[in-house]
Amino acid sequence: MKYANSTVPFLKFTRSIQSVLLFLVVILVFSCQKKVPEKKITAVDFETEAFAPFVEPNFPFITTSMDGRELGEGFPADNISARVLALQLGNEAYACFDTDMLRWTVAWTGAFMPMVTMAQISYDDFYNKGNQIPKIAGDPKVATGSYPGWSSGKPLFSDPRTPSPHPQSPAWGAIPAEIGRYEGIYTLGEQAVIAYSVGETRIHELPGSLKQEEMTAFTRHFEVAPTEDSLFLVVAEVAGADRVEQGENTLLIHRKGEITGLGLPPGHSGVRLAVFDDRYLVAKIAPHAEAIEFGLLVWKGAPEQLPAFEAATAEFKGKMPAYDQGGPAYWTEAVLTQGHVSPDTAAFVTDRLTLPVPNPWKRNVRLVDIGFFDATKAALVTFEGDVWIMDGIEANLERLSWSRFASGLYEPQSLEIVDGAIYVYGKDGITRLHDLNGDGVADWYENFSNAMAQSIETREWASSMVADPDGGFYVAKFGALDMGPETSSPKSLMGFRSASHHDGSVLKVSADGRSVTPFATGFRGPYLGIHPEEGWLTGSDQQGHYMPSTPIMLIRKGDYYGVPATAHRDPIPETAPPIAWIPHSQDRSGVGQVWVTSSEMGPLNGQLLHLSYGRPGLFQVKIDSGSTVVQGGVNVIPGSYPAPTMKGKVNPGDGLVYYTGFSLWGHNSETLSALHRLRYTGKDNFMPRDYKVREGGIVLRFDQELDPAAAQDIAAYQVKRWNYQRTQKYGSGHYKLDGTVGEENLPVLEAVLSDDRKAVFLIVPQITEVMQMEVGYALKTKAGVSWSDKVWMTVNEVVRPNLLAEGFSDVSEADLNQEYDASLLADAAGEEADAVRGKELFMNYGCIACHAVEGSGEGKIGPNVNGLYGSERTFTDGTTASADEDYLRESIVDPGAKVVQGREGEMPSFLGVLSENDITSIILYFKTLN
């Protein structure tokens, strides 16, 4: 008997037992191990972070401007571009593609370009505002002038755009779409494919470079759709040629011992090279029924490099990649942060959503706008041109996941999400971002619209974009403020330079992005808000020249808002009144607005909010629905605002307001950038529910019943009013109604409590139209809670009160016409002048935001006041003076009279705002700082 296989069943059984035991051991080991907690960032300290360079080596482009007017002899002198894709082509070779003109502005080798735009220079030097106009840093090789790079029918060597009304200023904006249009850029690792149309013909271009020994050539590989027209591409312009030479596959321009060459690799019968006027190197593409591909090489160098160029031309075999399939993801990691939920200590509190700093790319994150996909997911854009996706938004903010989505955009300040697509608005226009392969990173940067003209003037910001619920967008553009580096634009009016024909305007962008129409003009620096259901368009403007203070505006088609330099029409119409003015002491820099279309914000449901950069903080805006002329007022929403508040949105899930911003100019902020959530807790709200000015008095309405004694005490109220003057000076002082300097104090003759005890009617005589009315009050609820506050209103029309409807059944017509002692209107003498009071005034009026008391004054737009008194001052006109009492007094009431060198002259007048005693007190305070 043989038992050769008798042990097999037993061995199988033994192995099964061993497998089970091994499985149990593994389970036991893993169950005994502690779960490794996720690493989450809980706080950000920008000051201690070391950020990587602005330009990332593996990303193929940034969008910027380029001044190529001083490249040197032989290059075109008329060569300036407001919008270019600055491309990294490898081999230390670079090119700028002008998206307005479809041309290569310049191609060069060596160093890239200095990072000098405002976003770049302040990227890691946060308060550096010494920006410059971008120029190349290396050795220029080829360039073209200010004319279209492409055309059909014949080549164009002149600018077809509408000339500027200012003879010394160039034309700005995109060429007419019938000539050509930039369509966007695809990213494919370190490569990029540029898409544009010439007439009706779609073209894709893959730019690159190649190097053979000491010769570096720029390569341009094209895919051209079928066309019935002859197309012309101007590749280079060389002025002052010695001679032109035609090679087998090359065109050569000889000039002063150097050669500029254009090469056409063999095998492209439908393409030929030509030179026009012994100056322009041109490629002509014949009509063709099928799509074609071809390449060009362009080079400049010494004659001894010519054989290498000719060989490279003969050997070049380009291939268009599958650009519409998407490229590899540039950023694959997610950054986790944990937010901070504030305790419910007041009716409204601010929760912090922690930013992704630090991150694997050592990238700065200066947020400027936010949009929501849904309740838990949002997109955010930074001033440096990055788009981030944030996921995991919940009540406790426990786990926020941040990932990078896009980069390379030009100083964007707005982001909208429409039908799930991200739209970003910057100086490069409106870009629609696409993730073609679903890897979480954009790889098709579509030009939705560049129809709004943009100049190279650095302060012509692309400031605001809001989505029109009926389709398309509204965009706002700053006027070209006379600040920063001077370029090609002459002075327009005081405080402005001539720039594009759209500066200082609000424009309506069509639903397809192909056209824009002027909607309203006459702005200095507008920002927008819109009701997402009704389409009501609102805005604010920047105090400065011709803009006496911060306005809140209901913007209507055809409106003009008072800045003649940006009227863009003749004759200039009457100035439209704002809803309300906000005093400089409360908001010296207004930004966006948010309509609270939510049922989760308590007393703010349905209200309009205004965001202040300079304060920083949020205001509630009240629109007087009882007047036939737009008017209303504002009040501060109490809260903690550690960073500038610029843009915000309502989350469609939790119904709360999320807002963000970053710091650069003068402000009262504690940190560089932040993202916050304004949350209603359900606690008692002490902000006014409503307020309005009526003939005979003022209505203040609250949520709580008021203590009758406190409410009817006329000493609890202070009412004053003043006008502003709209002039070429920066801002405005305060003026009485008769035009003299100062403010008028108005008497409260009686305070009448409403029938429901939740409102008071202040009987105030001589109510009339006025730009600014301030009402301060100190009240107490029936439950015994005391508080004080102020509201600021604008009276554009005096409306008769309907006191019965307002709930004041005890007020009669006779009560509104009481006799009063006119001496009650006299101004109080004020407190005695002293340094302590001067310090209080300096702090209370927000002067500390622009003027440092100690330290270097980094980040401040005004001079340091420590050591100011008695110092020698040098002014922009070259004159000097000692900072004595007379100089300081003049600087406070007329700051534009003498502007210190290196400053922009951005201080408003305090004439009529501060009394003589106030000014003396501030000077006494300055004396203590020596």
Image (spheres, rainbow, N blue to C red):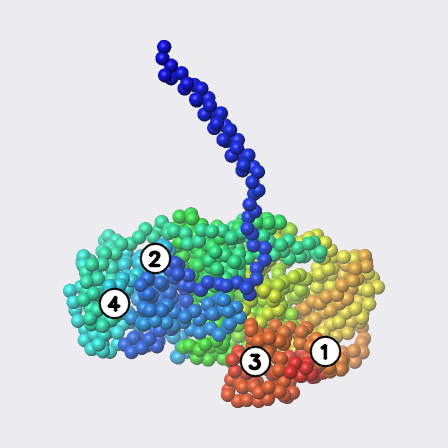
Looking at the rendered image, the disc whose residue lies closer to the viewer, 3 or 2, is: 2
| Residue pictured at 49% horizontal, 66% vertical | 123
User: Which quadrant: the N terminus?
Assistant: top left
Write down the residue under mark 1.
Answer: 837
Q: Earlier in the sequence, mark 3 or mark 4?
A: 4
- Image vertical order of residue 743 relative to residue 800, above or below: below
Q: Which of marks 4 and 1 is nearer the N terminus?
A: 4
Furthest residue in direction left, as rendered? 248
Q: Nearer the viewer, residue 506 or 843?
A: 843
Q: Which of marks 2 and 1 is nearer the N terminus?
A: 2
Looking at the rendered image, the disc whose residue lies closer to the viewer, 3 or 4, is: 4
Write down the residue under mark 4.
Answer: 214
Could you tell me residue 159's position as x and y percent? 33, 71
Could you tell me residue 276's position as x and y percent? 22, 71
Q: How crowded is mark 4: few (under 14 residues within 10 Å), some or many (20 or more)?
A: few
Q: Nearer the viewer, residue 160 or 41?
A: 41
- Image vertical order of residue 467 relative to residue 376, above or below: below
Image side of residue 377 versus residue 309, left or right:
right
| Residue pictured at 49% horizontal, 76% vertical | 483
Q: Earlier in the sequence, mark 3 or mark 2?
A: 2
Could you tell me residue 615's position as x and y percent? 62, 68
| Residue pictured at 51% horizontal, 76% vertical | 564
Name the disc covering residue 729, or none: 3
Would you identify the image quadrant in which residue 734 lies? Answer: bottom right
Total numbered circles: 4
Regarding mark 4 in the picture, which secondary structure is present there? loop
* Residue type (three-letter) at the residue carrying disc 3: Lys
Q: Does residue 161 show up?
A: no
Q: Does residue 38 show up?
A: yes
Furthest residue in direction right, as rendered? 709
* Residue type (three-letter) at the residue carrying disc 2: Gln
Name the disc covering residue 191, or none: 2
